[in-house]
Image: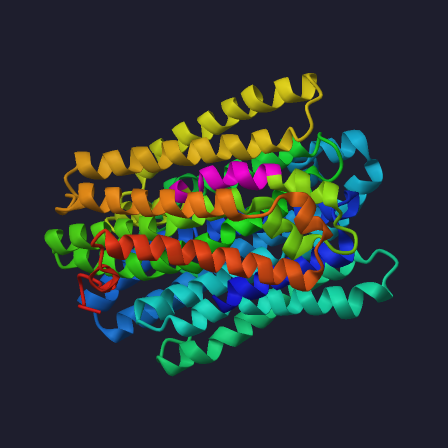
Amino acid sequence: MVSRVLGLVRDIVLARWFGADASMDAFFVAFKIPNFMRRLFAEGAFSQAFVPIISEYKEQQDRAAVQQLVNRVAGTLLGVLSLITVIGVLASPVLVAIFAPGFLYRDPAQFDLAALMLRMTFPYLLLVSLVAFAAGILNTYGRFAAASFAPVWLNVVLIGAAILVSPRLAEPELALAGGVFVAGVVQVLFLLPSLRRIGLFPRPQWGRQDAGVRRIMKLMLPGIIGSSVAQINLLFDTLIASFLVAGSVSWLYYSDRLVEFPLGVFAIALATVILPSLSRSHATDSAAEFSRTVDWGLRLVLLIAVPSAIGLLLLARPMLATLFNYGDFNAADVNMAGLSLMAYTIGLPAFMLIKVLAPAYYSRKDTRTPVRIAIVALVTNMALNLVFVVPLVMLKVPGPHAGLAMATSIAAWVNAGLLYRGLKKQQVYRPATGWRQFLLQIGLAGAVLGGVLFWGVPGMPVWLDWSVWSRVSGLFIWVMAGAAAYFIVLHLAGLRLGSLWQHPHDGG
């Protein structure tokens, strides 16, 4: 929660200081490329391959074997990613040309700026992958706090770079690119003492031939696609957006960030906890407990995803106006970002469901099935991008970037649906009783929430005329009113949250 709140503060500062223009589009591309690869080598395929293996070592082998695995994974990860980082820095113009070819076509100066910033941001891939490695160890041993707090430092450093450093530079956005690198260093240093406290401080050794390392690498290869399909979709969106009007990449960024707020506060936190739990159940052959944990996770996700999606859909532009409509981020930017935010919101429940469904495969070391599903979702996204965007561009309809967001949302539903069907088909997950009643309860509560916001929230001219305090207080009142309506109706419908929050594995 602290990380996501500070992330919103960071984005407010970026919008206030820099707005949505060609230079910020260049920074967001330079930031997205290492972040995309981080999802491959860090939170994505690596974590989902590493955590089940280290959990198995923890349960079945002695401490010395675990330490040896940690040392050899650290050395191999450091060696491979150092090489990738050097190549990425040297080939930054090529990477920008691949991921944002529209810059080169439309504005060579913007292309050069993006390539320069990418040289500064790309080493973040190495640093944040080491952070994910440390977090995987800590999470396996039940130490969630330090790893969860580490991303806070990225936001703190970027806010400081924007406010304190950027005014001193001829190209202010370069301060942000440098801040990304500094934040990676700070995050690594922050987690090292926690590893020392649990007695697993890594002493890197090259270990590519180690049996545990080889198993992790084998699990990673297909998982690179399976765990990162959403990021691949977003980067494909960026590629197409680079050909659209200046500001399109920024509008997609700001709307995606608001969708990421409930996703990060709840779904990613739940996924972080649920993967070691599922891995433990699989390692001890507790099939019933495994299924109960998946069922628990799905219910919790839907409990939060339904009101989050309805609220973001109906409060999209008021929220953007309240958070970002200051300084260089104008009313037109609010309108354009609002279009893509509403489109992304349609996929929010699917994004959140994937965070529970995918670990149910990776915890069993099944990476092939998510890969096949991810390929279907990826092809769906690419096809829908063309179906939605090309006609809008040809007809000169404002906001063709929203078509990219809509395609991503539909692809997420395809991904989530196929993951769910696969778990049921394999009989790994057996839905517990009471699902029909549960869906009716949250559906009724969601409808009441939607009615309260639809009929009560003032129109955009009112929001844009209001002062900052009026916007903030108005947004707070309507968010609280909607949340109160939702949970009151749930209670009246007979849903008791206390029993739902209780984890089926440990009773708390």
Does residue 309 appear in this view? Answer: no
Residue at 65% in and 61% down: 470
The residue nearer to you, when weighing 434 against 196, is 434
The residue nearer to you, when weighing 391 against 379, is 391
> Residue at the bottom extreme?
197
The spot of residue 119 in percent (x, y) is 71, 52
Q: Quadrant of residue 397?
A: top right
Does residue 69 appear in this view? Answer: yes
The residue nearer to you, when weighing 162 against 12, is 12
> Residue at the front extreme?
455
Picture quarter with the C terminus: bottom left
Say whether residue 11 is magenta.
no
Residue at 30% in and 47% down: 442
The spot of residue 388 in percent (x, y) is 56, 23
Q: Quadrant of residue 347?
A: top left
Say whether residue 345 is magenta.
yes
The spot of residue 10 in percent (x, y) is 64, 62
Whether residue 505 sits left or right of residue 190 in the image: it is left
Vertical order, 377 against 492 (above or below): above
Report the magenta residues as a range: 339-350
Residue at 44% in and 52% down: 263
The residue nearer to you, when weighing 414 against 113, is 414
Q: How is the image coloured?
A: rainbow
